[in-house]
Image: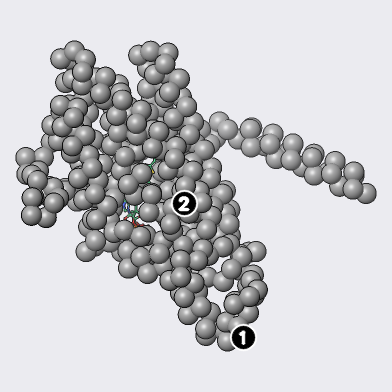
Amino acid sequence: MYTQELDVRGADAAAAADPGMLEQHFLARVDAEQKIEPKEWMPERYRSMLIRQISQHAHSEIVGMLPEGNWITRAPTLRRKAILIAKVQDEAGHGAYLYSAAETLGVSRDELIAQLLSGKAKYSSIFNYPTTTWADVGAIGWLVDGAAIMNQIPLCRCSYGPYARAMVRICREESFHQRQGFDLMLHLARGTDEQKAMAQDALNRWWWPALMMFGPPDATSTHSGESQRWKIKRISNDELRQKFVDFTVPQAKFLGITVPDPLLRWNEAQQRHEFGPIDWNEFEQVLKGNGPCNAERLAARRSAHAEGAWVREAASAHAAKQRLRATRHAA
Ligand code: FAQ
């Protein structure tokens, strides 16, 4: 793997003279907020942590196209259809940047996709829920993209250069997605009684799964310790979840719909919302593959992969032809 080559330029040279100092030097660079780049030395645990997280993130973007994609043919107006097509296409782009970022760590895209299709790899729990009404498209943009941005803005400062840079562009696009979702919800909330009921029903179904997107509570999060030490994760799961609640509750009030949590209340002293317990059993079931749409999502990805085989073959044949031409031209 080319990433295992040791870059011994500059300060790295001194550390390379004493292999025991490599990790210390790496940590000092992380502490100094320097970006770690693909060819530079990194602990193997750091590399595997990044491959795990970036690939899960890439899979989430790709599987995440399915719930909203379900509504492209049934969007109520041409304008909404054009917006939705563009949004779903953006998610494909995000998946592509993220697979590329993972590849810089020495793993192939084929390997990662095989892990997704075999059911071995995780992707975000949220995409295992169904989109049963048009309002779900609004709720996904508002809540799911909203939660994704909340989680991903700190990742723009993550210590691994290619991931941090991919996140900058992704967050810009996702903030547009969030606004379109809120705009859709606003139109429904200001529409007929039936439309307002659809908006409320979508909030009822997406609220708790959106809170689960931030991952398990800090006390049971397996990777947070190392991830925070290495400045991959900059803000903890619980802190981000809290920020999301504090940010989103006023938006629900503005829409005139009710967050489905009887225990939700503003704590004036702590300047934050208190909220009810999350059903972590439901989260675990979804992660185990027993969510409402896990089987459907994987079946859709497997079938898309099989149907796209001819495109991959054609692209490889074209690339081989180009390479041959370039070699002949150079000779
Ligand atoms: N779903 O120790 P932690 C989007 C797993 S993109 C499934 O806390 P970590 C855009 C976790 O992987 C949404 N699994 O883990 C869009 C680990 O399992 P493992 C995706 C989850 O990594 C919008 C175990 O639990 N975003 O929405 C989940 O430190 C609309 C222990 O957890 C990202 O991936 C979950 N929700 O923190 C697209 C952001 N949570 O690997 C289309 C990048 C946890 O040991 C339409 N990722 N797990 O088997 C991250 O920031 C982190 O990976 C966390 C989890 C915060 C998600």
**Does the beta carbon at disc 1 come under 8 Å from ligand 1?**
no
Q: Amino acid at mark 1?
A: Ala
69 to the left or right of 98: left
The image position of residue 249, as x and y in percent, is: 18, 39
**Does the beta carbon at disc 2 come under 8 Å from ligand 1?**
no
11 to the left or right of 331: left
Under circle 2, the secondary element is: helix
From the viewer's side, name the closer residue of 109 and 41.
41
User: Which of disc 1 and disc 2 is earlier in sequence?
Assistant: 1
From the viewer's side, name the closer residue of 231 and 64.
231
The label number, if any, that marks residue 17 in the structure image: 1
152 to the left or right of 303: left
Which dot, 2 or 1, sits closer to the camera? 1
Residue furthest right as drawn = 331
The label number, if any, that marks residue 55 in the structure image: 2
From the viewer's side, name the closer residue of 295 and 325.
325
Dot 1 crowding, Cα within 10 Å, few <14, some 14–19, many 20+: few
Q: Residue at x 24, y 19 (%)?
A: 188
Q: Does the residue at mark 2 contact the one at mark 1 (Cβ under 8 Å)?
A: no
